[in-house]
Amino acid sequence: MAFVRNNWYPAGFASRMGEGLHKRRMLGEDLVIWQQADGSFAALQDRCPHRFLPLSMGCLERDTIRCGYHGMTFAADGRCVRIPGQPTIPPSARVRSYPVELNLGLVWVWMGDPALASRELLFDLPEYHEAGWHPVDGEALEVEANYLALADNLCDPAHVAFVHLSTLGNAAHEDVPIETKVEGELIVTTRWTIDAEPIPLFQKFGSFKGNIDRWQIYNYHAPSIAVIDFGGADTGTGAREGRLHDGAIRILACHFICPVDEARSIDYWLHVDNFPSDAATRARMNEQFALAFAEDKAILEAIQVEETKLGGRQRPLRLGIDKGAVLMRKTVERMIEAERSVMAAE
Ligand code: FES
Ligand SMILES: [Fe+2]
């Protein structure tokens, strides 16, 4: 399987990557990432061109990285700036460097053609920066599954009624229809459950007196980003028409996926909410999310084991609820194909 390469992929929460060298595997390539004195981040291929020792086993010398074997030293742009014991540096003494940007509290690495990298292509979530909204970093959830299996799950409001019964789901929405639409590289899968009991998360953190109208809007930005807009409001108060009363809950649950390789992924998740809450409440809410995402991880890893056993001999049965996931996969395939044909033409 190929990946969409001309894309920004998350490498970690910036606040947790301040010190030292960070080894990352992304799209099957090994990288070493570090923060420079000016606060920006640098990423190099994690392999010294001399005898191939991973550079992450070396050390930082101000803004350069020194190999731990014979001391070749590289700048953030991949150029060798020192070869101990030898005054001349051959032009071939360099390592691949990757463009890096910061946004939404995450470090993003451009895995494709560096000439095509631009900040305009970085994903943004306006609410993250707006007053009245609270961004709360989550965790780096490692999943032993291909990233598209994780993506399937993030185009799939239906599983919530069966998998996340202690947090995000209840039986009330089991049979409620799901709508799907595509706009370019965005796949939107929506379920509105009207006049139903609040889910456990809203019972813990909300102040609803009775039944609610509940929305789950799964926005999947192919190839690897999901923003799940979900919430609830007192039933009959017009949430579906866009009116949210005080005390309504709206949460944007964000999943930024890094495909580690064919069989592993990391889901950097965080949430942004807009109801009055303190840091302790938000941390408790993240505990609930962590619980729910661990349930997804268990399911996706078990599925990966079965898929490996099957080795492609059986195709999964397609149901009506799969429309979003099918469209997502088609979109990703189309993006990969577009990159392939550009490369072939060159
Ligand atoms: S392996 Fe890096 S300098 Fe020798
Ligand atoms: Fe889930």
Image (tube, helix red, strand yellow):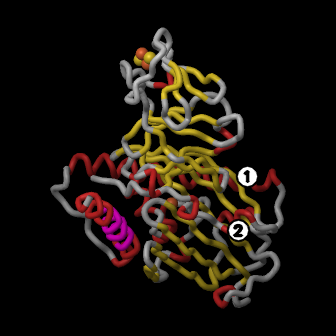
Callout 1: few (<14), some (14-19), or many (20+) C-alpha neighbours within 10 Å? few
Beta carbon at label 2 within 8 Å of ligand 2: no
Which label is found at residue 252? none
Q: Which amino acid does label 2 sit on?
A: Glu
Badge 2 is on which residue?
Answer: 127
Instruction: Please name which of the two marks, 2 or 1, marks the residue nearer to the observer.
Output: 2
Question: Picture quarter containing residue 183?
Answer: bottom left
Q: What residue type is labelled 1?
A: Arg
Question: Picture quarter containing residue 59?
Answer: top right
Looking at this rendering, what residue extends furthest in the top direction? 85
Q: Do the residues labelled 2 and 1 touch (CB within 8 Å)?
A: no
Question: Picture quarter containing residue 62?
Answer: top right
One can see residue 277 in this view: yes
Q: Residue 39: x and y, percent?
A: 70, 41
Assess whether residue 328 is covered by the magenta stretch.
Answer: yes
Q: Residue at image x 76%, y 67%? A: 130
Quadrant of image for the C terminus: bottom left
Up-down relation of residue 346 to residue 41 (above or below): below
Q: Is residue 134 left or right of residue 226?
A: right
Q: Residue 288: x and y, percent?
A: 65, 54
Closer to the chain start, of discs 2 and 1, is: 2
Could you give the CA–CA distance between mark 2 and mark 1, rounded to whole angstroms? 21 Å
Up-down relation of residue 70 to residue 29 (above or below): above
Badge 1 is on which residue?
Answer: 284
The range drawn in magenta is: 327-336
